[in-house]
Image (tube, helix red, strand yellow):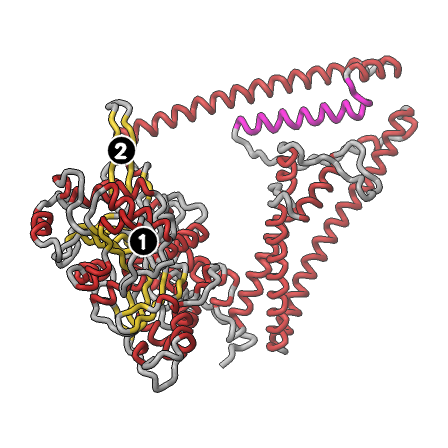
């Protein structure tokens, strides 16, 4: 039921909200974990079985995993980095490799990677050689008299560059003297370890994503497709989003932190568009918003005892008394100066009383005084200033009533006045008539204003009582107009704050014209350059004029706010459809701001809190970054997503392959970038939409997406395929470093 038009309903109050404590996660970063002890047992065992043992190295761009082929897992995993610096005090050069680089503070600033950033290609061979030295040292090969006496199996990227393979082969045979070397693709080793025969291998690793069809354990590399996106690009993309989201963030952001954020809090959305549309909705934002806390230094407030507080208060009082004494002394000096000036001008007034006009003019000119009226005004102003200063010192009322004009000559007949006094009398008569006219006009204006306000209030009440609907429509329209004016004023204020905006330039020229000694009468094209703004000090005057304390703009802004508040109060009382949430105050509230939810989550933000200033909120980034593999265009990558790539391979390129459904029955996911939650579900649902309804489809994950490549290579050692695929040192010396042997697990010759 609508409220009565006569009754005064109560204004609807806003709903009070409470906020539970936030779940805060500390920022993780790659650190030195533990020291890796060299072990010699593996070498001794490998030398006893040279035909079935080898050193297996999964040479990844994010981590290098090394161990013996007869182990169930690699002995250690290290990042392919090194650091070297010289200590001038000690006169020594220190070298670090792998995780040991994070153990020394100085070494962290000298870290270099073996791989080219964002690729799986080795580019820094001195770093790679240093990493290999570290690997062989930890595997106990330092007693091998300068040579590695055990075969080596190493993984490489799909379609690895011949030059990169050639350089690695030369290092292995020339520097380490290994008896044999075999290369293989990491994702194919992982597929082999998971008992795959025929299927579609989707490998999303640190630097790239590949879709490789495999038929009877043989990779069809001619049909493979590469997507230039991986875990490294995910971390870089997240860093860009965070820097754009928090441009003034004081914390140190790096790729390692972004990798941990994605690993712990990122996931793949099963319905990206719909979930993204509702991600910043208040309902459920508490669970979706992740708060990452960066280190910060809290301001420590020292608690003082009562005696210390009393001493501080006494010092403040003493300082205040000294300042008051200094101010009183300065006021007294100014007062004495004004009294001396007053006495001087009064003496001057007495001296010219009986003097001739010529002598009067001479004395007035010598004091830069125009006439006797100006002298009288100076004396009057000094008396007023002295009276005000004395009143302030004795604690009286500083507000002084406005002095009434002096019209003493009007009551004196003309025959008793000289010529100058008669002239002054005529001037006083004119001033009196003007003063009385202004007083009457002011009184009439105030009375008319009060009458108009009362009449408008009465008419507004009558319209509301007689026609409530039209009255409400009128209030809504006036509210919309007021809001539009406020928006325009806010936009103009922002433009005036920008020196390069059109509004700022126009105002600048107007001020320059006003300040000029010779203001321009007429503007001509090309001739209105005033050089205002060339000096930065010019802009101080500009800002002072633009934001004066008593400017009409501020009064108008206050009037707009009061008008809007009055209109909204009327609507809250009489409009049943107008709630507090519709008011300008509620819409300006942070809880209604999409940008606040995006940057600060579902809680109020305290800019004075050091903890909150060093926090990052992850919300839409949790699904936006992992989505790039499925939709590369959102990150500016001009390629198809893995679902479209896999669909094209299955439907177009393998159309003539017999038993095409065998590929659908085994879609295999491997690589660290596939560990996101819902990754397999998203691939399954995406492929299902591209295939016939009755097509068999099975999507499975690797048992261990990170270690299965190494385990597959270790299981491959000792087989007949490995023996026929490895290159011996004799073959290397005979056929050169470019020579490779093609096999089911490796690249083709190019």
Q: Mark 2 — residue?
A: 304
Residue 624 tag number: none
Specify whether residue 612 is in view: no
- Relative height, residue 252 to residue 617 (above, below): above
Q: Main secondary structure of the magenta part?
A: helix
- Residue at 60 percent across and 36 percent down: it is 399
Front in this rendered view, residue 734 or 479: 734
- Residue at 18 percent across and 50 percent down: it is 76
Kindly indicate the quadrant of the structure image that contains residue 631: bottom left
- Residue at 74 percent across and 36 percent down: it is 530
Residue neighbourhood size for the residue with mark 2, other residues' Cα within 10 Å, grouped as few (<14), some (14–19), many (≥20) = few
Give the quadrant of the C terminus. bottom left
The answer to whether residue 392 is magenta is yes
- Magenta region: which residues? 368-394
- Please state the horizontal and vertical placement of residue 217, each as a whole percent of the image: 26, 70
- Relative height, residue 488 to residue 695 (above, below): above
- Please state the horizontal and vertical placement of residue 588, each as a whole percent of the image: 49, 59
- In the visual, does 250 lie left or right of 721? right
- Relative height, residue 346 to residue 736 (above, below): above
Kindly indicate the quadrant of the structure image that contains residue 546: top right
Q: Mark 1 — residue?
A: 739
User: Which residue occupies the extreme bottom position in the image?
Assistant: 694
User: Which residue occupies the extreme front position in the image?
Assistant: 734
- In the visual, does 181 lie left or right of 562? left
The answer to whether residue 64 is magenta is no
């Amino acid at each position: 039921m609508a409220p009565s038009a006569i009754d005064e309903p109560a204004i609807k109050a806003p709903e009070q909200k409470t906020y539970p404590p936030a779940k805060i996660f500390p920022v993780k970063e790659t650190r030195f974990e533990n020291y890796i002890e060299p072990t010699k047992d593996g070498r001794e065992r490998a030398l006893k079985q040279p035909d079935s043992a080898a050193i297996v190295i999964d040479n990844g761009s994010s981590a290098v995993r090394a161990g013996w082929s007869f182990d169930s897992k690699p002995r250690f995993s290290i990042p392919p980095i090194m650091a070297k610096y010289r200590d001038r005090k000690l006169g020594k050069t220190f070298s670090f490799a792998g995780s040991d680089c994070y153990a020394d503070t100085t070494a962290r600033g000298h870290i270099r990677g073996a791989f080219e950033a964002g690729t799986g290609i080795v580019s820094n061979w001195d770093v790679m050689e240093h990493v290999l030295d570290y690997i062989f040292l930890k595997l106990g090969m330092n007693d091998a008299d300068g040579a590695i006496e055990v075969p080596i199996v190493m993984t490489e990227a799909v379609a690895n560059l011949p030059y990169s393979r050639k350089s690695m082969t030369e290092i292995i045979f020339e520097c380490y003297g290994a008896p044999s070397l075999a290369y293989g693709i990491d994702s194919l080793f992982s597929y082999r370890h998971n008992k795959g025969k025929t299927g579609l291998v989707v490998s999303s690793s640190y630097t790239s994503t590949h879709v490789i069809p495999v038929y009877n354990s043989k990779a069809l590399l001619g049909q493979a497709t590469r997507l230039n996106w991986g875990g490294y690009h995910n971390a870089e993309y997240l860093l860009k989003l965070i820097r754009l989201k928090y441009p003034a963030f004081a914390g140190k952001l790096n790729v390692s932190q972004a990798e941990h954020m994605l690993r712990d809090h990122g996931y793949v959305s099963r319905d990206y568009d719909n979930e993204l549309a509702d991600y910043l909705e208040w309902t459920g934002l508490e669970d979706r918003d992740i708060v990452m806390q960066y280190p910060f230094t809290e301001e420590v407030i020292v608690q003082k005892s009562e005696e210390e507080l009393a001493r501080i208060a006494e010092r403040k009082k003493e300082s205040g008394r000294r300042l008051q004494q200094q101010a009183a002394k300065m006021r007294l000096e100014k007062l004495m100066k004004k009294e001396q000036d007053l006495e001087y001008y009064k003496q001057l007034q007495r001296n010219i009383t009986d003097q001739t006009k010529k002598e009067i003019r001479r004395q007035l000119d010598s004091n830069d005084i125009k006439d006797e009226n100006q002298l009288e005004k100076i004396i009057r102003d000094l008396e007023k200033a002295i009276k005000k200063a004395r009143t302030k010192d004795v604690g009286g009322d500083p507000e002084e009533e406005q002095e009434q004009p002096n019209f003493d000559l009007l009551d004196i007949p003309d025959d008793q006045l000289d010529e100058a006094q008669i002239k002054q009398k005529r001037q006083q008569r004119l001033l009196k008539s003007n003063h009385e006219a202004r007083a009457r006009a002011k009184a009439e204006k105030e009375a008319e204003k009060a009458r108009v306000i009362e009449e408008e209030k009465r008419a507004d009440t009558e319209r509301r009582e007689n026609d409530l609907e039209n009255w409400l429509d009128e209030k809504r329209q006036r509210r919309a107009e007021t809001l539009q004016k406020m928006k325009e004023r806010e936009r103009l204020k922002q433009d005036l704050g920008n020196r390069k905006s059109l509004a700022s330039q126009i105002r600048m020229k107007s001020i320059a014209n006003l300040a000029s000694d010779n203001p321009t009468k007429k503007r001509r094209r090309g001739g209105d350059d005033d050089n205002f703004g060339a000096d930065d000090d010019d802009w101080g005057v500009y800002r002072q004029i633009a934001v004066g304390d008593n400017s009409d703009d501020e009064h108008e802004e206050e009037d707009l706010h009061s008008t809007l508040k009055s209109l909204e109060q009327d609507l809250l009382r009489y409009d049943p459809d107008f709630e507090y949430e519709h008011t300008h105050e509620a819409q300006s509230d942070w809880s209604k701001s999409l940008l606040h939810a995006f940057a600060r989550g579902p809680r109020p933000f305290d800019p004075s809190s050091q903890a909150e200033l060093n926090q990052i909120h992850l919300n839409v980034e949790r699904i936006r970054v992992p989505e790039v593999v499925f939709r590369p265009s959102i990150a500016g990558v001009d390629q198809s997503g893995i679902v479209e790539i896999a669909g094209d391979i299955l439907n177009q390129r393998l159309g003539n392959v017999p038993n095409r459904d065998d590929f659908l029955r085994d879609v295999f996911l491997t690589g660290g970038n596939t560990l996101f939650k819902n990754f397999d579900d998203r691939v399954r649902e995406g492929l299902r939409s591209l295939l016939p309804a009755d097509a068999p489809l099975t999507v499975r994950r690797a048992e261990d997406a990170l270690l299965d490549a190494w385990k597959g290579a270790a299981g491959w050692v000792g087989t007949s395929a490995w023996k026929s695929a490895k290159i011996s040192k004799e073959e290397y010396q005979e056929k050169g470093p470019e020579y490779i042997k093609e096999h089911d697990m490796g690249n083709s010759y190019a």
